[in-house]
Amino acid sequence: MATRIRPSSKRCAVIGGSGFLGRYLVEQLLDRGYSVSVFDIRQGYELPGVTFHLGDLCDKQALLAALQGVSLVFHCASPAPSCDDRALFHRVNVDGTRNVLQTCQEAGVQKVILTSSASVVYEGTDIKDGKEDLPYAKKPIDYYTETKIQQEKLVLEACDTQKGFLTVAIRPHGIFGPRDPQLVPILVDTAKRGKMKFIIGDGTNLVDFTFVENVAHGHILAAESLRPESPICGKAYHITNDEPVRFWDFMSQILVGLDYDPPKYRLPYRLVHVLAMLLWLLVLFLRPVLQLRPTFTPMRVALAGTHHYYSCTRAKEDLGYRPLVSLKDAITRTVNSYSHLRRVA
Ligand SMILES: NC(=O)C1=CN([C@@H]2O[C@H](COP(=O)(O)OP(=O)(O)OC[C@H]3O[C@@H](n4cnc5c(N)ncnc54)[C@H](OP(=O)(O)O)[C@@H]3O)[C@@H](O)[C@H]2O)C=CC1
Ligand SMILES: CC(C)=CCC[C@@H](C)[C@H]1CC[C@H]2C3=C(CC[C@]12C)[C@@]1(C)CCC(=O)C[C@@H]1CC3
């Protein structure tokens, strides 16, 4: 019979710890004196004090081995939203998360912190100062969001204070910062292809973009506040920069910071959305013979042309959360870190 190592409160595991957010989480945890194991399908970097366990989170035996002696688990692994593979999202985010919860219980883990997403309530229409009690989206904008909803429900429903198995979900929105493989690279690539000339809508829609260090900080506060008697058990928390910004101002600041021209011509939101829907239907129709990846998907157009910002009052009250880095400083640090993507004259 295998012997179980007694969990220590400063020993934690980060599932998805090789990824963008995961690595910041690992760095902050080390700074706070935790010993950290990373479980991921790839090893993204090397860092003294971090042990890597490579495997798929759907594989119970691999995960069980990585969770020995661990009392606290952060689960921030997911296929990238852009991959558009329904079966993969379901296998990893839903079945895989069920496996994470069962394996954590078997390994004697006491606390699970899930990285969910504020988009679990977003349906492509305006959300202004959205609170956590908004209902889950009935028509999620994509498969990624559909499975993030199911994932969050599984994790929050597994919370059982009697058994000492405690869970909480963090819902960040629009994470950005140095080393992000998504937001700035997509934006620069779009600009290089001459497709960043247009503002969709009137350009006044407000959105949350959240600096990655603030998101990691919110996760650690949640972990350290999670106790059987605390009000946070089984709840979801928005973590944002608490400074909603005009979507197009944010994009323009990054572009100008990297010497690209900001978008200046206005296009009506409804028109662009309908065109993106028609294009999407065409892509689906042609899919058996031709794989096309349009820049203007209905989901992207909705993200670019609607308000979607969220209140983080609950996190401030229950977790004592305050963003560590302001939006202004976050943008400066991010732009400076992407000097290799700067426009060459
Ligand atoms: N980025 C954002 O703006 C937002 C992100 N989130 C959530 O935050 C979390 C982290 O996002 P982010 O850091 O951007 O994502 P990343 O893709 O950078 O990190 C996720 C990590 O998980 C790994 N992974 C994927 N599938 C598996 C698997 N089956 N088993 C083990 N590891 C796996 C990935 O490997 P590989 O790279 O090889 O796939 C990657 O290393 C996700 O849950 C995401 O849904 C929520 C809101 C906004
Ligand atoms: C706040 C939030 C949910 C951010 C998510 C990040 C991405 C979804 C964005 C990163 C770059 C963005 C982008 C567009 C849409 C949203 C992003 C993919 C456009 C495609 C919107 C339409 C355009 O004119 C081009 C934009 C390129 C960058």
Image: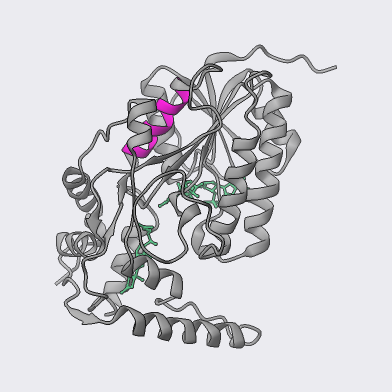
Looking at the image, which residue is at 47% across and 25% down?
223
Q: Is residue 128 visible?
A: yes
Which residue range is magenta in the image? 214-224
Tell me if 17 is positioned left or right of 177 in this view. right
Q: Is residue 222 part of the magenta span, yes or no? A: yes
Q: Vertical placement of 33 versus 335: above or below?
A: above
> In which image quadrant can residue 47 be found?
top left
Looking at the image, which residue is at 43% across and 81% down?
276
Of 260 and 155, which appears nearest the observer?
A: 155
Of 204 and 68, which appears nearest the observer?
A: 204
Looking at the image, which residue is at 31% across and 46% down?
210
Tell me if 161 is positioned left or right of 293 in this view. right
- The colour scheme used here is one colour
Q: Vertical placement of 208 versus 228: above or below?
A: below
Q: Is residue 223 part of the magenta span, yes or no? A: yes
Q: Split into 4 quadrants, where in the image is the C terminus?
A: bottom left
Q: How many marks?
A: 0
> In which image quadrant can residue 200 be found?
bottom left
